[in-house]
Amino acid sequence: MRKFLLATLTTLIAVSALYAQKVKGSDTVLPLSQQEAESFTKANKSANVTVTGGGSGVGISALLEGTTDIAQSSRKIKFEEKQKLQEKGDKVVEKIIAYDALAVIVHPSNPVSKLTREQMEDIFTGKTTNWKDVGGPDMKIIPYSRETSSGTYEFFKEHVLKNKNYVNGIMSMPATGAIVQSISQTKGAIGYIGLAYLDKKIKAVQVSFDEGKTYTAPSVKSAMDETYPIVRPLIYYYTEKSEATVKPFVDYVLSAAGQKIVRDIGFIPISK
C-alpha cells in the first residue's frame, strides 16, 4: 500500500511539474498568451500557466537565467543569447505562434492619415519635427517609443528606421498600453503598437514602403494578403531540456483552438 501511495504521489508531482509553467516577455504577445493560458487551463484542470510581460529582452534573459519556461518574443533571439544557452549545455527551440502587423498611430484629431517609410524614419530619428512638413498642421511632433528591452522597439528600428538611431529624448514607454494612453491624450503624438492594441482612442495611419506609390492600412486582412509591409512573427522560445514540460501548452497554442484565439484577439494565425 505504501509503495502504491508513493508511486501515486510521484506521478502527481510529475503531472504538477508538467503543467506548472511560466511564460514571460513580450508586451505585444502578452494578451495572446494570457487568453491562450486561460483557455488551456480550462481544458486541463491540473494545468497552471502564469503569464507576465516586461518586454522580449526581459523574457529571453529570464529564459537564460532559468526563471521562466517560455520566453514570449516579438523579435528573433540574438546570436549571443543563443550562445549563452549553448555554454550551459542546452539549446533553444523556436516556435512561431502567430504574426503581427505593427501599426503606426497618431491622435484621432490629427488629419495626417498617410506616411511613407522615409517620412516615418525622419520623424523617429528627429529630422522632421513639425507635422506641417508631412502635410499636417503647424504642430510639434511628439514621438513615442517602447523601451530598449522591447522586441517591438528593435523590430521598428530595424525595419522602418533601417537601423538608424531614435531621436535623443524620445518618449520611451514601458508597455504598449502606456503608448496607447499617451497618444490618445496628446494631439501631436505618434507611436507604434501591435495590431491587437488598436482601438477607437487612437488612429492608425496608412503606410507606404514604395516611396508613396501605394499606401496600406494595418489589418489582419492586409497582413495575411501581404499588402501591409510591417509584419513580424510572434515567437515562443524554450530550451530543449524543458520541451517535454512546455509541449502540451505550446501544442495547444498551435492547435485549431489556439489559432482561433490568435485571430479573435487581432493577430494573424500561422496558417493562412
Image (spheres, rainbow, N blue to C red):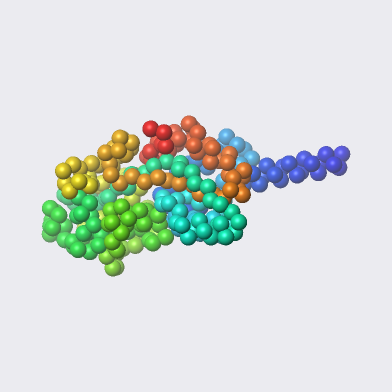
Asked whether residue 247 is in view, the answer is yes
Asked whether residue 31 is in view, the answer is no
Which x, y percent locates residue 209?
22, 47
Instruction: Give the quadrant of residue 175.
Output: bottom left
Looking at the image, residue 203 lies above or below residue 188? above
Which x, y percent locates residue 189?
24, 57
Q: Is residue 213 rendered to the left or right of residue 76?
A: left
Instruction: Give the quadrant of residue 164.
Output: bottom left
Residue that lies at the very extreme toward the bottom in this rendered image: 168
Q: In this view of the protein, which residue sits in the foreground, 41 or 206? A: 206
Q: In this view of the protein, which residue sits in the foreground, 55 or 41? A: 55
Q: Quadrant of the C terminus?
A: top left
User: Number of labelled discs?
Assistant: 0
Which x, y percent locates residue 191?
29, 55
Looking at the image, residue 26 lies above or below residue 97? below
Q: Is residue 207 rendered to the left or right of residue 76?
A: left
Q: Quadrant of the N terminus?
A: top right
Residue at position x 23%, y 41% from top?
216
Residue at position x 53%, y 37% from top?
252
Residue at position x 17%, y 48% from top?
211
Q: Is residue 156 rendered to the left or right of residue 17?
A: left
Which x, y percent locates residue 20?
62, 47
Residue that lies at the very extreme toward the right in this rendered image: 1
Residue at position x 81%, y 44% from top?
6
Q: In this view of the protein, which residue sits in the foreground, 196 or 127? A: 127
